[in-house]
């Protein structure tokens, strides 16, 4: 019996050694591309913990439904590509703090674009290293959920540029989502659904400045963009239905394949 135990232990150690060698050489590690998705609620409908929208279990799907956002449907349509969706519903590009009863600012679960990207990286490693191939950058709530100053717009662009350049320096292929056309969003309906009729309705001129400056930013940097919102149906004037999320996900897939051959 003692010899049998010893043999079994040696077998386990030997198999572990073989596995370690295989991991080190990449021989038995799946080589599927990994794409990280970051952005707001149309990319991930789950609200993070410690926010006004979170539930007792520290997360909540949009309107309490089994909402599947664009980041969720992307993996369903994109063949062998693995998707790590670290976007956050109602997220800004920066960490958000809210006042407590005493007026002191407290951190929330909204941690911003840099955290989302780094969290995606932390969830994307195999034992032989990082296998992230692509980063999908959806837009955040900056300047669309509240009035925007020129300084705030510059800061938004600066934050997102920093994340994209960090990804590029790591050899990660970046694809950026364009804003929808103004007429593709029903801001009044969204305000009623999401904020009881008290949500901010961005003026068309301000929205178009946000939309066009975002597109120009990435065009000038040579970063590919994709327009996913055409012919979308929504559940509240903004968040796409499951059918439309699938349609958008296919457009993202095609754009990654066209620009970077990811998943071909």
Image (tube, rainbow, N blue to C red):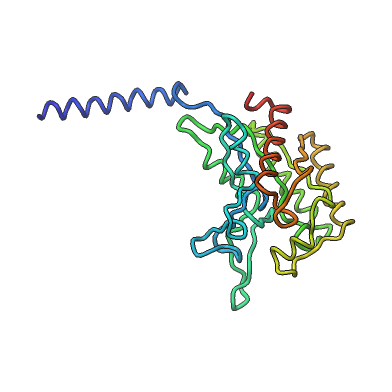
Is 142 on the left or on the right of 68, as rendered? right
Image x and y of residue 209, in percent: 87, 52
Is 3 on the left or on the right of 185, as rendered? left
Of residues 69 and 87, the one drawn nearer to the viewer in this rendering: 69
- Residue at (62, 33) in percent of width and height: 78
Work out whether 117 lies above or below 206.
above
Is 255 on the left or on the right of 74, as rendered? right
Rendered-image quadrant of the C terminus? top right
- Residue at (82, 43) in percent of width and height: 215
Work out whether 196 lies above or below 172.
below
Question: Quadrant of the rendered structure where residue 191 is?
Answer: bottom right
Image x and y of residue 261, in percent: 68, 25
Image x and y of residue 220, in percent: 83, 37
Question: Quadrant of the rendered structure where residue 195 is?
Answer: bottom right
- Residue at (59, 73) in percent of width and height: 100
Work out whether 262 lies above or below 52.
above
Residue sticking out furthest to the left: 1
Number of numbered discs visible in the structure rendering:
0
Image x and y of residue 204, in percent: 87, 57
Rendered-image quadrant of the N terminus? top left
Of residues 255 and 3, the one drawn nearer to the viewer in this rendering: 255
Residue sticking out furthest to the right: 205
């Amino acid at each position: 019996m003692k010899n049998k135990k010893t043999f079994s232990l040696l077998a386990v150690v030997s198999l572990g050694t073989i596995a370690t060698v295989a991991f080190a050489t990449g021989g038995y590690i799946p080589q599927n591309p990994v794409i990280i998705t970051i952005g707001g609620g149309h990319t991930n409908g789950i609200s993070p913990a410690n926010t006004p929208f979170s539930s007792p279990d520290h997360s909540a799907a949009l309107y309490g439904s089994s909402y599947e956002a664009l980041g969720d449907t992307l993996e369903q349509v994109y063949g062998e590509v693995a998707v790590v969706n670290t976007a956050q519903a109602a997220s800004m590009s920066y960490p958000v703090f809210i006042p407590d009863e005493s007026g002191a600012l407290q951190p929330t679960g909204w941690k911003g674009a840099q955290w989302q990207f780094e969290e995606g990286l932390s969830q994307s490693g195999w034992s032989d290293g990082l296998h992230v191939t692509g980063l999908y950058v959806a837009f955040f709530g900056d300047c669309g959920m509240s009035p925007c100053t020129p300084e705030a717009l510059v800061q938004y662009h600066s934050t997102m540029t920093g994340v994209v350049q960090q990804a590029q320096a790591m050899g990660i292929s970046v694809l950026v989502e364009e804003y929808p056309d103004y007429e593709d969003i029903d801001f009044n309906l969204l305000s009623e659904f999401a904020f009881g009729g008290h949500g901010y309705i961005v003026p068309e001129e301000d929205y178009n400045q946000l939309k066009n400056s975002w597109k120009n930013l990435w065009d000038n940097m040579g970063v590919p963009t994709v327009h996913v919102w055409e012919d979308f149906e929504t559940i509240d004037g903004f968040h796409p239905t499951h059918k439309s999320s699938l349609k958008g996900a296919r457009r993202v897939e095609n754009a990654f394949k066209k620009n970077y051959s990811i998943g071909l």
